[in-house]
Image (spheres, rainbow, N blue to C red):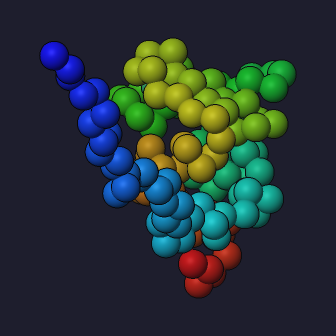
Amino acid sequence: MQTTNNKAAPRNGTASTPRPYSTKSGWNYKSGFDRAKLPSPTDYFAQQGLKLTGGGEWKNVICPFHGDSKPSLRVRIDTGGFRCMVCGAHGGDVLAFHRQRYGLNFKQAAQQLSAWNGGAR
Ligand SMILES: [Zn+2]
């Protein structure tokens, strides 16, 4: 008895290897942002009518994110970073502050702070 073991192994000629598509998703939503145009934290918080008190680089401010009566919000005047000791609001710069305070998206906040290159897509 002989078993012929020479089955032609079916060659998978149509092996479809998924090609990694590099689809660019339109425009980068941060493309028009120019961080250099952000107002300085000192100017910004003054514009917002927030009084900075205290010495050093961390200032105390009445927190606009909760019903604050005494300054609980600490802001860094060099970076605009902020953190509230009471409600926990925090962020890294005046843009983050602006977004949170007014519920804006990145572009809207950048535009309002004149840090968006107009019309750039
Ligand atoms: Zn707060």
User: x, y percentage for residue 13?
Assistant: 37, 55
Q: How many marks?
A: 0
| Residue at the image point whose x is 34% and y is 49% from the top | 12
Q: Is residue 76 above or below residue 96?
A: above
In the picture, measured across the screen, residue 94 lies left or right of residue 102, that is: right
Q: Is residue 1 above or below residue 33?
A: above
Near-viewer residue (62 or 6) = 6
Near-viewer residue (25 or 37) = 25
User: x, y percentage for residue 54?
Assistant: 74, 22
| Residue at the image point whose x is 49% and y is 54% from the top | 20
| Residue at the image point whose x is 70% and y is 39% from the top | 80
User: x, y percentage for residue 74?
Assistant: 62, 24
Q: Is residue 107 above or below residue 64?
A: below
| Residue at the image point whose x is 57% and y is 24% from the top | 83
Quarter-of-image position of residue 114: bottom right
Quarter-of-image position of residue 56: top right
In the picture, measured across the screen, residue 112 lies left or right of residue 42, that is: left
- Could you tell me if residue 5 is visible in this image? yes
User: x, y percentage for residue 28?
Assistant: 56, 64
- Could you tell me if residue 112 is visible in this image? no
Kindly give the residue lying farthest to the front in the view shown. Answer: 1
**Image quarter for ligand 1:** top left
Is the N terminus in the top left, top right, bottom left or bottom right quadrant? top left
Kindly give the residue lying farthest to the left in the view shown. Answer: 1
Is the C terminus in the top left, top right, bottom left or bottom right quadrant? bottom right
